[in-house]
Amino acid sequence: MPFSRKMKQFFGLTAAFLSAVMASQTPAPAQSSLENDWNNPPVESRLRAYWWWLNGNVTAASITHDLEEMKAKGFGGAVIVDANGANQGGNARVPHGPTFFTPAWRELYKHALREASRLGLEISLNIQSGWNLGGPLEVVKPEDAAKKYVWAETNIVGGARIELALPRPKARDFFYRDSFVVAYPVKNARKASNPLLNWKLKALQASLEPFSAPDTSPLFAEIAATPGEEDARTDAVVDLTAKLGADGVLRWDAPPGSWQVLRFGYTIGDHANVSTSSDGWAGYAIDVYDAGAFERYWNAVVEPLIADAGPLAGRTLKYLHTDSWEIELANWTPGLREEFQKRRGYDMTPWLPTLAGRIINSRDESDRFLANYRKTLGDLAIDHHYHLFRDYAHKHGLLIHPESGGPHSVPIDAQRCLGWDDVPMSEFWAWSWEHRIGDENRFFVKQPASAAHTYGHPLIFAEGFTDIGPHWQESIWSNLKPAFDKAVCEGLNVLVWHAFVCSPEETGVPGQQYFAGTHLNPKVTWWGKSQAFFSYIDRCQALLQQGLPFADVLYYYGDHVPNFAQLKSSDPAGILPGYDYDVITEEALLTRTSVQNGQIILPDGMSYRLLALPNRSSLSLPVLLKLKELAAAGATMIGPKPAEASGLQDYPKSDQMLRSVADDLYGGRGIMTNKTAREVLLAKGLRPDFAWSVDGATATNHEIDFIHRTANGAEIYFVMNRASNAVTLNATFRIRGLAPELWDAVSGEHHFAAAYAEKDGRTTLPLHFDSCGSIFVVFREAASKHPSTGTANWPALKVAGELSGPWTVHFDPRWGGPESVSFDKLEGWTERPEPGIKYYSGTANYRKSFTLPATAGRKIMLDLGQVRELAEVKVNGRTCGIVWTPPFRVDITSVAKEGENSLEVEVVNFWPNRIIGDQLLPASRRLTQTNIRQLKKTTPLMASGLFGPVRVLLEQ
């Protein structure tokens, strides 16, 4: 399969090169591709759109218009997502267009591919309508739906022939199939015992919390055992499956005594439905553990859609996609017994009572069986679904980027699933007041990033700026930018904006919208000035795709299922701040790690100083044997000494072998215990890769974060200030011998730092961050060629004058504003008495003249003060740029002149105020048209306009 230029660059880097770079950076020639990609980001570095075909209500004309506008604004492509959800949250429905997969829909799809090809855009296709892969009954039968196990209990007294109709477990949608009948003798005078701790979580009868990227520690919790507390021994559990007739009658010559009989079967899962589909595609979600279910769906739906693409498959149609997996507790599949036997090496039948909360043999052994049960389902999700998805796509030259890591609490090894993708993809949310408040519920980027880094994938996609609650109410600079910057520091390098809703002209303005996500399409008020923000994203992504990510620590997160990597700040190895880490799965650890020059390396060039193990008493025996191999080769590792092997395979011999190996491996020159990764690295003399201080004190009260990449002699750091307050700090990088360059992705400018110092193999320089500011610091060329001059790294400016007095402001009468009005002073539009200004949404043009004295060739800046939300500045009729983030300042040196100058400031706010104001008007007089109903006449207005103070600044 052909690789892109970036992929070739990624895989061309060698482990030996990286080892040398990590030990000490030496002067290297500048890499021209940095400038080239910065100035003109390649298509794979440009942002994507979650292109929502809302209820299929799109037209050929709207498709063409959207794609042309995406191309014009710097997008690299789009993900076609046919889905609905328009009316959630009390919003109005939108008309139904062609149903997904019908001939009419497929003609629109083919038109989209042709237009994207003409424009040089890449298209991904969500292979269904909505998410939770599935479809209507003619596509997904109940037999192929996601399933859960159910059971019914019966007590009988033996010693005679039993012919008893067993109660049938509760089923969903009249679908039920029997699996097993087992019985075990009930002890006489049995003492009441506590069940397995958290047994419903362990048996996948309840979900872990939080519901997204959940905490899995309850899977390892257990109370102390009590002698005789077990319900039965495995040798006493009787398999009666063959004795249950088709009529549901158990016919059994039961031995004497009291018996508990459990009739196990399966039905359709509680959440086994396609979510948020357009009309006509509602139905069951498929059983991801069943290869036949996937193959039948693929042949029925996906193969024809690939055929529709013709020669554009693998070119314009580059990726196939499925969205987040939200089927929750799908916990059974036909054939599980055979798959379990093949993968775990023993029969699961005697252990089935543990699925109903019983203790078989012992607490420990029951927990181990349940771990094997969950892990088998995790294996099947890959082998019978994502592995097939990838292989089938590759046969057509296509790649895949499903959101295969959840993020809901589904029974998977989430990072392993993502590792099987060509492009690991997850999601992150913008802040909202209503839903997913807090990073632990909103950011799922460290996991796909670690999957990419440890499985050899150069790109990390994420659905971004999702939220529930706001409607055109997200601030670009104080909400979207810091969310993007944080996702970048977690590892993101391709944003897929959620959501860009296709809204045909006849739907009005602002038109039809999905109930969630940050609304974006050519109908937003700020579309005409949007490229400034999009260019920031594209420039960032261009540098963040260079070379390889840099991290000192590799953290192994266990072999259990469910399993999820958390936020970067979760810091499982105890390494933060100032260092970085990746998470690795059992599979990748066993098959992709080796040691070179004392460092743990991966085949694609990644290299780590140290491997950290989870703080648990159990460990996979194959992993421990791998650790022994790594230790013998010179790897540094930390973690607690395990006491037992995970799972029940070869028990108790597995425990005996594990303890024997652990006794040899831990202590001495083996694995260190009772130390954090940070302590070990500092003891080795390896200072943080990045550190910062404010006024000489370590900065802990500022939301500073970073990420580091290394590429052919260039060391690339991205540093962000997530806080809304500005800060000046001293930043220290573990780099020696190279001169720092400051690359500003907002302006697109870059230059060598004037002031920096090197000490003890590290380089320190002052950095200034405005509110929610960010900067790239790049090291490429020898410090001897660009020595520190001791002058400031940013220009010192003084106020030359403030533009006070009246402003003439022009509004667009088509949107209710006055054509011209005089503002005696700068104030917000919502503070004005005129309804046409108070409720105005769109662009207003501020005009004023100002006089400049002779400036003796000094740089002249115009500072707008506060702006809500964007502004374009023109001086003497020439544009000076668009500002969308603090300090809302432009360079007017080249266009300003001594004496009188004309100034225009075009200020754009967002849609809510006009929509809110329309609620006060009769329907016939309203200017806006949309299905969104959450903006009511009582909704607070958004601050809008130019607030100032507007000042002329001169470089000192």
Image (tube, helix red, strand yellow):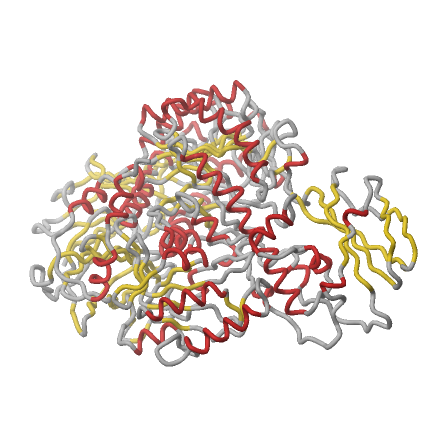
The percent coordinates of residue 103 (x first, y second) are 53, 18
Residue 464's place in the image compared with 954, above or below, is above
Residue 168 visible in the shown view: yes
Compared across the picture, whether 204 is left or right of 536 comes to right
The percent coordinates of residue 608 (x first, y second) are 32, 63
Residue 746's place in the image compared with 782, above or below, is above
Nearest the viewer among 146 and 253 is 253
Residue 146's place in the image compared with 714, above or below, is above
Residue 59's place in the image compared with 267, above or below, is above
Nearest the viewer among 539 and 260 is 260
Q: At 59% from the left edge and 63% from the top edge, which residue is drawn?
A: 648
Q: Quadrant of the N terminus?
A: top left
Q: At 23% from the left edge and 37% from the top edge, which residue is drawn?
A: 879
Compared across the picture, whether 4 is left or right of 319 comes to left
Q: Quadrant of the C terminus?
A: bottom left
Residue sticking out furthest to the bottom: 668
